[in-house]
Image (tube, grey):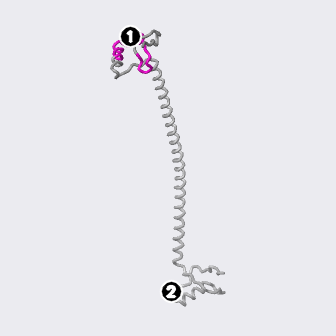
């Protein structure tokens, strides 16, 4: 069965080659290919293995398909990069927020440490004062000076003291209801 040439529309009998993709025939005189290369493709076609010849129409279609595939792959890569970029920006935002929170917490921690130091200092002073304090309960209100009453109690208990000047301060803490 003879097929028409894709260039001149004349039936191909001899001196033609068939496209391995579309199976249409072409006269070899219209192809810009060395004769040795044409013979190579003819021998491959007879043996059924090796390289196959593809016409320029099919090659263009395949090339177009490859371009479409490449464009789709490029778009997928762009989408992936955009996703990664967005995720990276999101992580940077979270890191900045955590960094700000950490700075605030660090400052708050420093302030709390300073407060603790002040409280410990005040407690130390209070403890030192308490070492020299004497708390006496159950003494009824009297018209006498409270300092004199305490001196009498110390004398009665035989607590050594040199004079009344050792007692720096005497005060009442209030009555229970």
Answer above or below: position of 18 versus 148.
above
Magenta span has 160? no
Q: Earlier in the sequence, mark 1 or mark 2?
A: 1
Residue 97 placement (x, y as % from top left):
54, 49
Q: Nearer the viewer, residue 162 or 58?
A: 58
Q: Nearer the viewer, residue 157 or 119?
A: 119
Identified at 60% across, 80% down, the residue is: 170
Residue 120 placement (x, y as % from top left):
52, 67
Which mark is drawn over residue 160? Answer: 2
- Find the magenta span and give its range: 18-42
Q: Secondary structure at mark 2?
A: loop
Write down the quadrant of residue 47 in the picture. Answer: top left
Residue 126 placement (x, y as % from top left):
54, 73
Identified at 61% across, 86% down, the residue is: 139
Magenta span has 37? yes
Left or right of 119 in this view: 172 = right
Q: Residues within 10 Å of mark 2 (few under 14, many from 20)?
A: few
Write down the quadrant of residue 12 in the picture. Answer: top left
Answer above or below: position of 7 versus 52.
above
Residue that label 1 marks? 15
Left or right of 46 in this view: 96 = right
Q: Nearer the viewer, mark 1 or mark 2?
A: 1
Give the number of marks.
Answer: 2
């Amino acid at each position: 069965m003879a097929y028409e040439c894709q260039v001149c529309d004349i039936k191909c009998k001899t001196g033609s080659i068939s496209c391995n993709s579309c199976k249409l025939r072409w006269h070899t005189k219209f192809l810009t290919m060395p004769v040795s290369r044409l013979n190579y493709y003819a021998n491959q076609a007879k043996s059924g293995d090796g390289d196959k010849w593809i016409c320029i129409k099919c090659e263009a279609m395949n090339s177009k398909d490859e371009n479409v595939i490449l464009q789709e792959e490029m778009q997928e890569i762009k989408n992936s990069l955009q996703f990664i970029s967005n995720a990276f920006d999101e992580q940077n935002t979270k890191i900045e927020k955590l960094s700000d929170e950490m700075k605030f917490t660090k400052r708050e921690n420093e302030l709390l440490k300073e407060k603790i130091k002040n409280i410990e200092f005040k407690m130390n002073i209070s403890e030192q004062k308490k070492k020299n304090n004497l708390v006496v309960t159950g003494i009824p209100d009297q018209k006498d000076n409270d300092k004199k009453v305490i001196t009498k109690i110390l004398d009665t208990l035989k607590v050594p003291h040199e004079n009344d000047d050792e007692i720096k301060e005497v005060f009442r803490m209030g009555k229970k209801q």
